[in-house]
Amino acid sequence: MSNKSYSLSHTKWMCKYHIVFIPKYRRKVIYNQYRSSLGEIFRRLCEYKGVKIIEGYLMPDHVHMLVSIPPK
């Protein structure tokens, strides 16, 4: 993992968030139906919002993501 801090005009920041997505009733649909498209969808959304994905894992019944979000 990166310990690099980023800077804006008068601040230095390192905001990292651990996000977990869980389908209702923990149904194991991520690996079967949606695995191929979820990675591309998450990358596109994060790029659109200016968020950097540090790590991401798809499990059979949930998704783990470590993201760096600017404090704007």
Image (spheres, rainbow, N blue to C red):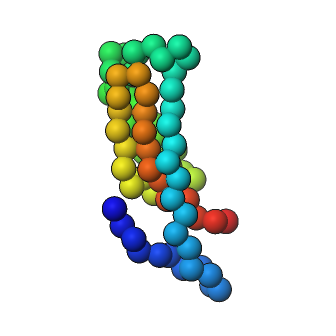
Q: In the drawing, does residue 66 fall left or right of residue 25?
A: left
Return the x and y of residue 2 as percentages of the image width and height. Answer: 36, 67
Instruction: Determine the residue positioned at 43% across, 28% down.
Output: 62
How many discs mark residues in the rendered view? 0
Residue 40, visible in the rendered structure: no
Instruction: Determine the residue positioned at 53% across, 14% down.
Output: 25
Q: Quadrant of the C terminus?
A: bottom right
Return the x and y of residue 66 as percentages of the image width and height. Answer: 44, 50
Instruction: Determine the residue positioned at 50% across, 37% down.
Output: 20
Above or below 15: residue 38: above
Return the x and y of residue 47 as percentages of the image width and height. Answer: 48, 52
Camera-side residue of 37 and 5: 5
Camera-side residue of 40 and 67: 67
The extreme bottom residue here reads: 10
Above or below 63: residue 16: below
Residue 69, visible in the rendered structure: yes
Camera-side residue of 5 and 46: 5
Q: Quadrant of the N terminus?
A: bottom left
- Find residue 69 and report its image quarter: bottom right
Instruction: Determine the residue positioned at 37% across, 44% down.
Output: 56
